[in-house]
Image (cartoon, grey):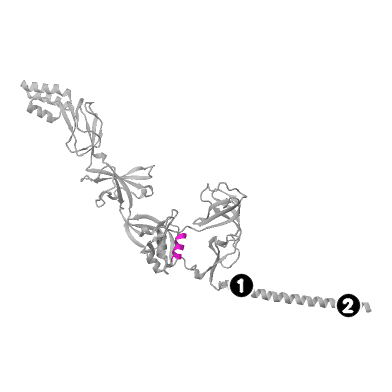
Amino acid sequence: MTKTRFARAVVWLLGGATLVGAGYLVGAHRATGTASTGVTATATSAIGDKTDPKSGRKVLYWHDPMVPNQHFDKPGKSPFMNMQLEPVYGDEGGGSSGVKIDPGLQQNLGIRYATVRRQATTGGFDAVGTTQFDESRTDVIQSRVTGYIDRLYASAPMQRVAKGAPIASLFVPDWLAPQEEYLALKRGGMDANLLDAARARMRALSIPDGMIAALDRTGKAQTHIVLTSPEAGVVSELNVRDGAMVTPGQTLAKISGLSKLWLIVEIPEALALDARPGMTVDATFSGDPTQHFTGHIREILPGISTSSRTLQARLEIDNGALKLTPGMLMRVRVGGQKAVSRLLVPSEAVITTGKRSVVIVKNRDGRLQPASVTVGNDVGNETEVLKGLNEGDTVVASGQFLIDSEASLKSILPRLESGMGASAATAASAPAPAAPTYETTGKVEKVTPEDMTFSHQPVPALGWGAMTMTFNKPTPGSFQNVKVGQTVHFVFRQTDDGYQLTKVEPVGAAQ
């Protein structure tokens, strides 16, 4: 009986201890849960209003500096790199894109603005043209008889000659006999029918009517004839010399006139579909820019030149003043036939980077922001914009910051932002600074013709931790001696296409 009571007392004691312990654990758990909930609520509150609890600054979003276009609503580790996301604060200008420039700096930089406008213009384009002889006006001087060059007045090709100027004198022995026969019949008093037959025979032998008339007047036979130029021009071709024998149908020379010339317009292949016969042409040359030569495209020549990738159009221009000669290079403006409404900006406002065309747009709040545009044809000093701008937008028309060898907007805009100090005018005229470089040490994990992958140490200047990352090569043949598995010291910089290596050396060889 006593043992039973003792056993029951032990059981009750153990049960009470268990209940006390369980109550303690539940209370501790609830306290911890309450504290955790409080912390979570505080963090949630901080994320909800996006305020940095350390600095008290308003956070717009978090991002990975390596992938700046991807935004996150809360801090944490980047899904792209082994690094923490960084906050972007509202007072840094992240909420309003572009760069704010002080008015004084704008004046020092000489920045001018222009308004994007819409205007009805005739479709056209600028091109170059070359003058040539009008081959349709080339005269051929031929021999109709067998004879000899008694005297050659034209000495060499491309010699200028006037209308009616002598080219060559021919001695024709075969003309002597028919002329003597005609004179004998005439002296013998033969009837008119025989004389007419003799004249017809002389004409059949290509004796000119003028020479026959002179034979009636003088009574003397002639065996020489002078061939003359039918119009003013140049001897474009000369095929005989003094004393040479010529035969019927042989070409002695060609005379190309200068009063009319052909203008061959070289139209770029990209504009070939815009060219039509009948389009107006206004041409000038450097010798006299005030003198304009106008005309209409007469025909489009078939085929694209394989060397210049241009389509040729031909027209006739008036050269009565003889100011032009064949082979002159002329500036040509080809005008369209119908007026078309176009969106225009000054041509100097367009920055061509090689991959795209960019203009700097002024926002309503005064900030400057780059905008990619699709451009069309040039219209005088203006350029047509097909996409990227609206009528009434304000763009930067000129300013020293547009004069950039690479037109790299990532370097232009930070320079403007940092130039808002006392040395703004000096910075405006100074050359653009080179992009900063960064260096670290790492192990080569992969090598391709385009890039290299390293597992590298931290880069404090960029706030990077240790990570594995790929860097671009300057050229496919760069750093050929670097192999996978080597530990190297490398230098890189930021470009439009990412991070590019500038130097890679094995650790043992690095200085």
Q: Is residue 439 above or below residue 222?
A: below
Q: Quadrant of the N terminus?
A: bottom right
The secondary structure that dominates the magenta segment is helix
Q: Give the x, y percent position of residue 329.
A: 30, 46
Q: Is residue 196 magenta?
A: no
Q: Amino acid at mark 1?
A: Ala
Relative horizontal placement of residue 198, taking residue 274 as reference (left or right): left
Relative horizontal placement of residue 317, taking residue 374 as reference (left or right): left
Residue placed under numbered mark 1 in the picture? 43
Relative horizontal placement of residue 467, taking residue 436 as reference (left or right): right
Q: Nearer the viewer, residue 56 or 371?
A: 56
Residue 142, quarter of the rendered image: top left
- Mark 2 and mark 1 lie on one chain; the one further toward the N terminus is 2
Residue placed under numbered mark 2 in the picture? 8
Q: Amino acid at mark 2?
A: Arg
Q: Is residue 463 above or below residue 241?
A: below
**Total numbered circles:** 2
Range drawn in magenta: 410-419
Residue at x 17%, y 38% (from the top left corner):
163
Q: Nearer the viewer, residue 114 or 13?
A: 114
Q: Is residue 468 above or below residue 63?
A: above
Q: Give the x, y percent position of residue 288.
A: 25, 50
Residue at x 61%, y 74% (from the top left corner):
42
Q: Is residue 98 visible?
A: no
Relative horizontal placement of residue 324, taking residue 312 as reference (left or right): left
